[in-house]
Image: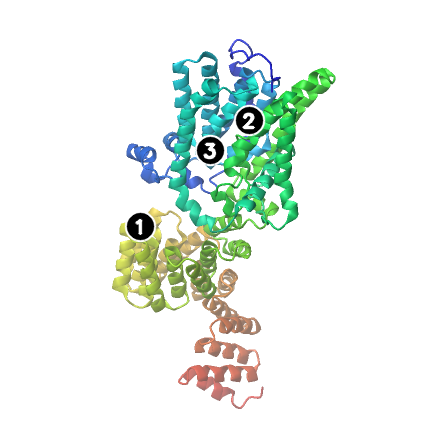
Amino acid sequence: MARPNQPEGPRVSWRRGVLPWTFLAILAATVLVYYPALTGGLLWDDDVHVTPPELRSIAGLARIVFEPGTTQQYYPLTYSAFWLEHRLWGDTPLGYHLTNVLLHSLCAWLLGLLLVRLSVPGAWLAAWLFALHPVAVESVAWITEQKNTLSTVFLLVAGLLYLGFDERRSRGAYLRATAVFLCALAAKTATVVLPAAILVVLWWKRGRLSLKSDLVPLLPWFALAGATAALTVRIEGRLISAVAEDWTLGFVERILLAGRATWFYLGKIVWPADIVFIYPRWRIDSSAAWQYLFPLAAAGLTVVLCFLRHRSRAPLAAWLLYVGTLAPTLGFFNVYVFRYSFVADHFQYVASMSLFALAGAALAGLSGRVPARAALALGALLPVALGVKSWYEAFEYQSAEIHYRAILAENPAAYLASNNLGLLLLAENRGAEAIELLENGLRQKPDSSELHHNLATALRSVGRSEEAIVHSERALALRPSFAEAENNLGAALTDSGRAADAIAHLQRALELRPGYAEAENNLGVALGRLGRTAEALASYDSALRTDPGYAEAESNAGSLLLSLGRTDEAFQRFERALALKPGYAEAENGLGAAFATMGRLDDARRHFEAALRSRPSYANAERNLGNLLAGLGRAREATLHFEAAARLQPENPEALSDLALALSRENRNAEAVLRWEQAVALDRWNPDLRFNLAVSLARSGQVKQAKSALDETLRLKPDHARARALLTALAGRAG
């Protein structure tokens, strides 16, 4: 920054070096640095920022602007920008990424203009440091944080305009600056710090503040900032209060947190190593003496800079701007992010500018003290080195999976990353991997109803319904009015053969969330298992009235109609499901089953194989194809498909039973025995499984064990004629 008593800086002139090529150079470098992230998709809550269907009309835009609560946060200008962008490039992430890079470049350029206007040495070096520093990656590569980049553009323009007003004292200049400040507030509430920041800058320029000329003109700005902050607190209070139950901080703990966070952020500016999207969450402990060192050191530095202000006000001004801009996120107020971390890089996006200005001025000051080449090399190499580091950080935003895995590599306790990656893999039918991640998340946060629910969903996807029931019940114990968990519990109960118990939970889900299409669909499945076919079909149709594009309900209706022998109607349902969702594996499998009932085995095989192409880990299609091949006498091929089904559903007794029968057909009785034993362990009360185990034991020469299995069969089902006949046949044989 400039020396304290230096004359006011010149007005920015397009003919004095501040030319369009300056911005184009910053833009080109920024695009290059962030190129790895440009192909990235949606992350975290990006889906609620990219305008949803119900808000894409002109009426939707009016709701965004005039109805607080319509969007996740009441930032009408930011969400209006998202609305406009959706008109331009729809759901394509590239457009949003490019917009964010453009806005960030514009922020860096405006920072340079502002510092030139203030006659700060090294102004453009500071702009380059800001443009390329890794702490900005989170704000630029994450679509959601367009609210950061957009609001900062307005904040800097408002600052420039206010400096113009301060020089000329023109009413028009003041009104223009105020209008842009309102835009900044409408883009993000964090910009409320601007009037206080302007006072710090004016004090730095003059060495004193005048009540009349400095403070009074900013009073309306302070009023606007206060009103905006109060509105935001009121709108977001319910959400923040809900998650604030995850932590309870007293006044002392908040001071400790603020001190530690301040030094943490400063450390990332000075040495941007180990940048992580979710940093490990600290334990703030007022009984730990070492934690008091952070706020004491911050207070001590402030005192030292105050004593040094007579030599130069710049360090104190930069420090006050930095800490003051960070203040809303230092822990004095509850912030949603605190549920998983007390710090996040995007919190210091604006605050970092003052430190970059100080660094630029300091490096510029070296030019008279060290050889010119050394100063030039340092001034050039530092931004390049930061840009290379940011380039590597941007790679972590190439895809959602890469992003979440990068977080977990640095912070395995980041349960939200475990949860999101688990859901992502579950959507790709990678259930076993999803289970491992969700279990890791629960180890970190065992009281999360959401994690229990998601783990239950993953367990259901691999046929582990009994375990899914346990986790769904736990989710409901933690959150009794959790409609999705009620629905999941009902589906798991149906899967485990307890359809009668499932119905009450599915109906409860519909009470909690009327028009819940998935619950209607699952209710149809449960009713169908109980033979209440008319009610089941009505439930499927109800789901389709709520969601006409619900392919799953069409396919399930087709399966029920096929079981009733209404093949033509079933065909129509399956075909509609495929029209709604091309390549839908369940519908392809259903069409295969329909063709098989008609004896059109070639067509049936074609659809079973199509189902497996769409979903390679689809156990039911593997079993159906195995049964078809077994019927054609192609035992070895059939066994391969049954083995695949058993690998996919290792805890499904029916899949193990199919494999055991196939092995028996090939006279591989020892292997069949192993599979029958596994099936029996999973379904201990099934007499037919025990009988089949006895047959394979007898064929493999294990007569004593076969007799024992037959005794168990008859204990479970005394009138099992085949078991009694086999026991009689084995009576005279030695074990």
In this rendering, the answer to whether 539 lies above or below 39 is: below
The quadrant of the rendering that contains the C terminus is bottom right
On the picture, is 365 further left or further right than 111? right
First in sequence: mark 3 or mark 1?
3
Q: Distance between the residues labelled 1 and 2?
A: 48 Å
Q: Which amino acid does label 1 sit on?
A: Arg
First in sequence: mark 2 or mark 3?
2
Which of the two residues, 449 or 21, is positioned nearer the viewer here?
449
Q: Distance between the residues labelled 3 and 1?
A: 50 Å
Q: Which residue lies furthest to the bottom in this view?
A: 732
Q: Distance between the residues labelled 2 and 3?
A: 24 Å
Q: Where is residue 440 in the image (x, y as percent from the top left)?
A: 55, 55
Q: Where is residue 646 in the image (x, y as percent from the top left)?
A: 50, 63
**Crowd class of label 1 (few under 14; some 14 to 19; many from 20; radius 10 Å):** some
On the picture, is 252 further left or further right than 521? right
Q: Position of residue 512 (x, y in %)?
A: 32, 56
Judging from the image, what secondary structure is the residue with disc 1 in?
Answer: helix
**What residue sits right under mark 3 in the picture?**
190
**What residue sits right under mark 2 in the picture?**
30
